[in-house]
Image: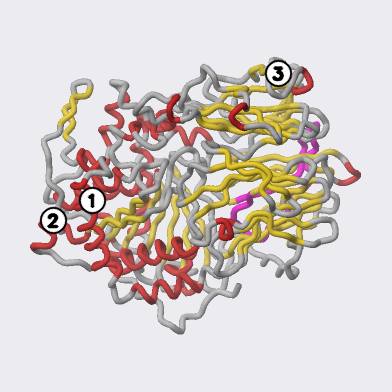
């Protein structure tokens, strides 16, 4: 793939003598000029990169086969978990071939209507439905819509019965779903300050929590929380079902953990709530909700790396906490909701993660004693626990794993039954298959393995292998290893067209649960942050060596992939241990760690990485910053860098500068490509998802020797 010669030389970016002196460190930045996306020089260089990519990947003879396979694997009909309000049920639904999901509502009679269809709003499919929330009365829906992949949504209020726009758009509303207040005909929401109120060049969030009453001018919405707080603060919102209690979580970029604020909305007008801080340990992260019984329950890592559930009296937030569900060895408590179990006893349904796989348990709401274990389809991901407001015995959740597209299941705590949710307006779903660790999907098997990192830490890893390799490797295969390892994010098993296509073609997929992630709780997360970030990369390298030593693959057949913080991971892997890897997909990456705080959401991540404004922390960043560790003449793996022009989280300047550095330094620059796309960091149209997966698979398969699927390849049953 690709060629060397005069065309390679002409596409290389000119180097400049830009140097920064930071606390005694001399830091060269020869491609600083590529940070300016609007300059003519950058535009000319990008045109050359697009031409190189088109010749190398876009015109590759196997690309059509990979696209055909990915498209065939993208035809699942998907439904999101339901949200119940006053006799109506709201849910997202995606049919085959649709670019974006629609938001639907069904009444007591079962009739279904579309409330929001992003494709009707924008036929190009580039408008994305963001967070949404129905009103307590079920008559209105507040939702966010983002155009062109930009995570700068506008807020709309729609009539649930007709889909008619009642209010909006309200701009600068990037944040969580609005939190409605029962009986008040309004909601709390997060909104950024206008551009003319933010200092020039300041990329921090500058958000506030506002109150809005339906029928009033949003320009007059009072800010109820945020004035005087750190401009990098991000917020979470929830209101109790009875409309009495407002809980706001506040997290700032430079500090670990968060702070909870609680307001009794009966003590004054909703536009002027009186907040009190909830007592918690410095650096801990907590989330609280007030249930139908009036008790506040808080999920916290205060005193428990794997989290525990405590309760307190919301009228006395400074009072003592009572532990309801204790930390469990080897598991992380992810979520908890209230349901009524046998004999109508108030119970807590708890979602746990063990080695990235979900478990559900039922507990007495007062004593916390275990009363039941919920049967699940297999070792996969459980998400989106929902219940009816005010209680009841039912709960709904989604399930997916590496070989099973997402489905929604219904749990009845009164009898312990788990059944497919009967989606209104749709045929009754097929029952979820039985399974577990190593479950056989017909075309693939998922294995759970463990290995030792360089410092002796025991790390778990998931392997998805073709059915014929279930008993172990019979010889090395092309292997794709994906990683993230940051922000306490758990690398959960989920169905993806790219993974399915890779394994069905005869390859192996691996996902190690490295430090920096949350697979083993907050301590596991913190063990891969700040001054200890190198442990994340060491765990990843150790996974590669284990896979090679065990015979699953070889360095000539090993590809790695990561996005966002995962892009940082694979970028560091490529420059630290280039001999281990044949090919790299590095998407939406952070790569210049000295200047990451100057763009996108960078200031909000100082608690994770450290800050270049601190003399000690800049040494942490310089020790691994991939852009600053590119060395001339090294035999680097083939690298596909993907940049998204509308990315408001991670500026595409990182991918541009790294591409230029590698093309200058690599012994074979023909393998270094830049893929550009005018979308954003997150959700994208289905066609764009297929296109991205196709290009990545074409690139990685070519470099690792994985044959493209033939036209008659058998596919997993839907």
* Residue that appears at 46% across and 50% down: 149
Return the residue at label 1: 43
Q: Are marks 1 and 3 in contact (CB under 8 Å)?
A: no
Name the quadrant of the N terminus: bottom left
**Mark 2: secondary structure:** loop
Query: Is 58 located above or below residue 595 in the figure?
Result: below
Q: Quadrant of residue 108?
A: bottom right
How many other residues sit within 10 Å of disc 3, few (<14), some (14-19) or many (≥20)?
some
Looking at the picture, how far across and down is residue 508, in whole percent?
42, 65
- Nearer the observer, disc 2 or disc 1? 1
Return the residue at label 3: 317
- Residue 667, labelled with which disc? 2
**Mark 1: secondary structure:** helix
Segment colored magenta: 358-383
Looking at the picture, how far across and down is residue 380, in whole percent?
59, 56
**Mark 3: secondary structure:** loop
Instruction: Decide which of tag 2 and tag 3 comes sooner along the chain.
Output: 3
> Total label count?
3
- Nearer the observer, disc 1 or disc 3? 1
Looking at the picture, how far across and down is residue 429, in whole percent?
72, 68
From the viewer's perspective, tell me whether residue 619 is left or right of residue 254. Answer: left
Q: Are marks 2 and 1 in contact (CB under 8 Å)?
A: no
* Residue that appears at 50% across and 27% down: 233
């Amino acid at each position: 793939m690709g060629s060397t010669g005069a065309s390679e030389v002409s596409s290389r970016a000119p180097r400049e003598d830009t140097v920064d002196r930071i606390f005694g460190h001399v830091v060269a930045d020869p491609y600083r000029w590529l940070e300016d996306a609007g300059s003519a020089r950058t535009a000319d260089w990008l045109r050359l990169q697009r031409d190189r990519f088109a010749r190398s990947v876009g015109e590759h003879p196997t690309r059509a086969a990979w696209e055909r396979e990915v498209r065939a694997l993208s035809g699942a009909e998907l439904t999101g978990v339901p949200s119940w309000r006053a006799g109506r049920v709201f849910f997202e639904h995606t049919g085959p071939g649709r670019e974006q999901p629609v938001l639907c509502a069904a009444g007591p009679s079962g009739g279904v209507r579309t409330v929001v269809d992003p494709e009707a709003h924008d036929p190009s499919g580039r408008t994305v439905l963001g967070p949404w929330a129905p009103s307590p009365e079920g008559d209105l829906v507040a939702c966010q819509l983002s155009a062109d992949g930009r995570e700068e949504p506008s807020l709309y209020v729609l009539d649930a019965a007709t889909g008619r726009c009642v209010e909006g758009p309200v701009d600068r509303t990037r944040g969580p779903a609005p939190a409605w207040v029962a009986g008040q005909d309004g909601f709390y929401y997060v909104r950024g300050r206008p551009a003319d109120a933010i200092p020039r060049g300041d990329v921090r969030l500058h958000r506030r929590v506002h109150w809005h009453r339906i029928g009033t001018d949003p320009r007059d919405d009072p800010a109820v929380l945020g004035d005087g707080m750190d401009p990098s603060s991000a917020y979470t919102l929830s209101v109790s079902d009875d409309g009495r209690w407002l809980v706001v979580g506040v997290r700032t970029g430079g500090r670990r953990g968060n702070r909870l604020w609680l307001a009794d909305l009966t003590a004054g007008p909703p536009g002027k709530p009186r907040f009190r801080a909830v007592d918690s340990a410095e650096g801990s992260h907590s989330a609280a909700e007030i249930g139908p019984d009036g008790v506040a329950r808080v999920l916290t890592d205060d005193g428990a790396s794997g989290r525990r559930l405590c309760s307190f009296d919301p009228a006395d937030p400074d009072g003592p906490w009572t532990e309801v569900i204790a930390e469990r060895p080897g598991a992380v408590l992810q979520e908890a909701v209230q349901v009524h179990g046998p004999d109508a006893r108030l119970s807590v349904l708890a979602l746990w993660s063990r080695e990235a796989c979900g478990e559900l348990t039922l507990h007495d709401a007062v004593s916390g004693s275990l009363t039941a274990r919920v049967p699940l389809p297999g070792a996969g991901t459980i998400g989106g626990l929902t219940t009816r407001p005010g209680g009841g015995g039912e709960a709904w959740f989604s399930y997916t794993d590496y070989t099973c597209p997402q489905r929604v299941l219904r749990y009845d705590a009164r009898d312990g039954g788990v059944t497919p949710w009967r989606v209104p307006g749709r045929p009754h779903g097929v029952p979820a298959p039985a399974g577990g660790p190593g479950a056989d999907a017909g075309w693939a098997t998922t294995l759970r393995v463990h290995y030792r990192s360089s410092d002796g830490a025991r790390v778990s890893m998931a392997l998805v292998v073709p059915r014929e390799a279930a008993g172990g490797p019979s010889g090395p295969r092309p292997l794709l290893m994906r990683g993230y390892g940051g922000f306490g994010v758990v690398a959960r098993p989920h169905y993806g067209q790219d993974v399915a296509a890779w394994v069905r073609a005869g390859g192996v997929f691996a996902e190690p649960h490295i430090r920096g992630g949350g697979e083993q709780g907050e301590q596991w997360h913190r063990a891969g942050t700040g001054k200890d970030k190198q442990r994340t990369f060491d765990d990843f390298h150790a996974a590669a060596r284990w896979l090679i030593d065990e015979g699953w693959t070889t360095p000539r057949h090993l590809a790695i992939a990561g996005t966002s913080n995962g892009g940082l991971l694979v970028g560091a892997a490529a420059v630290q241990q280039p001999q281990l890897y044949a090919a790299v997909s590095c998407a939406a990456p952070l790569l210049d760690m000295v200047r990451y705080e100057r763009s996108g959401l960078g200031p909000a991540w100082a608690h994770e990485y450290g800050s270049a404004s601190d003399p000690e922390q800049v040494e942490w960043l310089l020790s691994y910053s991939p852009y600053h560790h590119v060395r001339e003449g090294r035999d680097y793996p083939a690298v596909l860098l993907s940049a998204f022009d509308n990315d408001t989280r991670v500026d595409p300047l990182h991918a541009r500068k790294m591409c230029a550095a590698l093309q200058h330094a690599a012994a074979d620059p023909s393998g270094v490509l830049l893929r550009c796309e005018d979308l954003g960091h997150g959700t994208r149209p289905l066609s764009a998802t297929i296109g991205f997966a196709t290009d990545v698979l074409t690139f990685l398969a070519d470099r690792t020797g994985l044959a493209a699927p033939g036209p008659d390849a058998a596919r997993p049953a839907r």
